[in-house]
Image (spheres, rainbow, N blue to C red):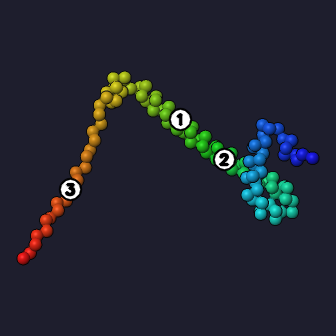
Amino acid sequence: MKSWREKVDPIIKNHLEAQIKETLQHKDAYNQSKDKGKAQLWVAVANLSKQIINLELKIKYIENVLKDMILKLNELKEQKPEKIIKEIEEPKKIIKKKTKKKIKKKKTKHI
């Protein structure tokens, strides 16, 4: 007889196996529960919640980057094309730090 996991739609089967594998990392914890099945499901829910929160943080970061890019593009649009071209063409000044050269003293023999 086939396991219920083998009868799962192939579209979600890999996702199911990934969640089960992730949940197994907490086996010691949910094995201490009176209802191991429910505890295992709650661990899976917690793992999914963590994944969602991480994705939301990444999305917010990307949204902020895009907002900043749009603001900068709008600022560039307001500038005159000549000014933009001039800024691109002008080489930026590179400031070189002066380094001190150490002069080696020749050793002289004292007679």
Name the residue: 49% across, 36% down: 68
Q: For the residues labelled 3 and 1, say whether their Cβ atoms are less than 8 Å apart.
A: no
| Left or right: 8, with 104 as reference point | right
Query: Circle 1 — which element?
Result: helix
Camera-nearest residue between 76 and 1: 1
Q: Is residue 54 left or right of residue 19?
A: left
Q: Nearer the viewer, mark 3 or mark 1?
A: 3
Q: Residue at x 79, y 42 (%)?
A: 13
The tag earlier along the polypeptide, 3 or 2, is: 2
User: In this image, 67 relative to 30: left or right?
Assistant: left
Disc 3, SS? loop
Residue under the image location 79 percent in, 54 percent down: 42
Instruction: Report the Cα–Cα distance between label 3 and label 2.
Output: 54 Å
Q: In the rendered image, which residue does mark 1 sit on?
A: 66
Q: CA–CA distance between discs 2 and 1? A: 20 Å
Query: Picture coordinates of residue 31 (x, y %)?
Result: 82, 62
Decide which of tag 3 and tag 1 comes sooner along the chain.
1
Find disc 3 in the rendering and name its residue: 100
Going by the numbered disc 3, the residue's amino acid type is: Lys
Q: Is residue 79 left or right of residue 99?
A: right
Q: Nearer the viewer, residue 77 or 90?
A: 90
Position in image of residue 29 (x %, y %):
77, 62
For this rendering, which residue is in front, 59 or 1? 1
- As drawn, which residue projects farthest toward the bottom? 111
Q: Is residue 79 visible?
A: yes
Q: Secondary structure at mark 2?
A: helix
Q: Give the quarter of the image for residue 33.
A: bottom right
User: Pointer 2: what residue?
Assistant: 53
Q: Return the residue found at the far left.
A: 111
**What residue sits 23% from the left and 53% below the top?**
99
